[in-house]
Amino acid sequence: MANTRKDANHLRDFERSLPMELLKARESAMARFRPMLRDHGLTEQQWRVIRALAALDQINASELARRSFLLAPSLTRILQYLEAEKLVKRSSDANDQRRAVFSLTAKGKKLFARVAPDSETLYIKIEQEFGADKLGLLYELLAEFYQTIAAEEETNISSAAAR
Amino acid sequence: MANTRKDANHLRDFERSLPMELLKARESAMARFRPMLRDHGLTEQQWRVIRALAALDQINASELARRSFLLAPSLTRILQYLEAEKLVKRSSDANDQRRAVFSLTAKGKKLFARVAPDSETLYIKIEQEFGADKLGLLYELLAEFYQTIAAEEETNISSAAAR
DNA sequence: TGAATTAAGTTAACATGTTAAGTATACTTC
DNA sequence: GAAGTATACTTAACATGTTAACTTAATTCA
């Protein structure tokens, strides 16, 4: 009896790992997007950068990192690749020589125009299967979670720095 | 006017990227767990493997991959490292020479016993900040999403294979 | 103004993610 | 029972994740 209870608890503890549940949900979606992106010769992260530039052109690396949710070293490598493929163009900020400013080339814009509809199609399929209402609720909860937990983290950092 | 609408749409399209929202939520949680794990000399993935073995000892690599949600090549490398650190012991399945069976060493169990309480403390803090009720709802939605989307994907694969 | 500090990127080093190919063992089927 | 197929990993190759260190340019402030 004691053994049974103990094992069940371990199992439940393990099951309730939030980061892993978030990862599983994410993976189930990415399993659909990844093959499509691959057909276009892109990784998920490269596509995030291209999307961010398509939404707002001429932004610097820091802002691009924030919007594509990539760490600076990853972004550096990805931008080097995208530049080599002539999908992205780098220029420099006249007011701040430390900053690099990026934009899509014509080739990059064309690629975005080809991939975006495929992405949208897959997204709509997911929305239909899961339900638009539940999906909306999920978005809300995720945003709220992120704001609560990341913001509290900020607070912790700030208070630590203030000591 | 047309330009304004178009830009707004781009922005909204970009914002509603579900995989990225899931990633952001996950990252906000991992930002808390990672430093703690680091203090114990573990990566997130190594900890997932140790947790899985603590919950159910003597399991083979395939089952371990499923439970720790790692791809086989990653798991191979992680197990090689954990073996070298003498945290995990490998044995072979007498009934199937292809299979490897893994278990925690005494050292591995001690490490688990040290890390688990720290993990639990952080988890409880998150639960308190976000709210147990909302967290429960988030779990439910994530599980439902995963089952719907990953299961449908299975169906697609099966029907494709059946052709 | 010149030294100290901060900010923006980049590079380095190692771990993991992802796909494809390889190896050894088990199974199936003719 | 030998050939063909499937299973269970492992290795390889390249991309990204993560932390720390480094470089250069801007800023602060004594």
Image (spheres, coloured by chain):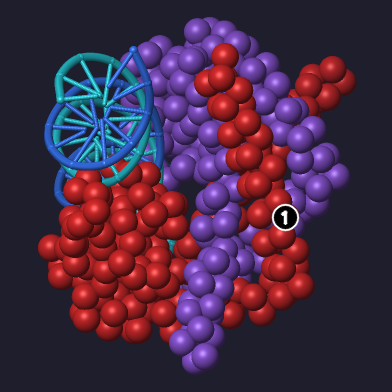
Chain colours: A red, B purple, C cyan, D blue
Residue A49 horizontal/vertical position (percent): 35, 62
Query: What kind of element bears circle 1?
Result: helix
Q: Would residue A33 be seen by someone viewing this image from the given angle?
A: yes
Residue found 48% across the figure and 62% down from its top: A30
Residue found 27% across the figure and 68% down from its top: A103
Query: A128 or A157, which is in the foreground?
Result: A157
Relative to A149, A49 lies left or right: left
Q: Categorize mark 1 by other alpha carbons within 10 Å: few (<14), some (14-19), many (20+).
A: some
Location of mark 1 (residue): A141
Count of marks, rendered view: 1
Relative to A79, D9 lies left or right: right
Amino acid type at circle 1 is Leu
Query: C4 or A141, which is in the foreground?
Result: C4
Relative to A13, C22 lies left or right: left
A55 to B27, vertically: above or below = below
Residue A82 horizontal/vertical position (percent): 21, 63
| Chain bearing mark 1 | A
A83 to B99, vertically: above or below = below
Q: Would residue A47 be seen by someone viewing this image from the given angle?
A: no
Residue found 46% across the figure and 87% down from its top: B3
Residue A126 horizontal/vertical position (percent): 60, 74
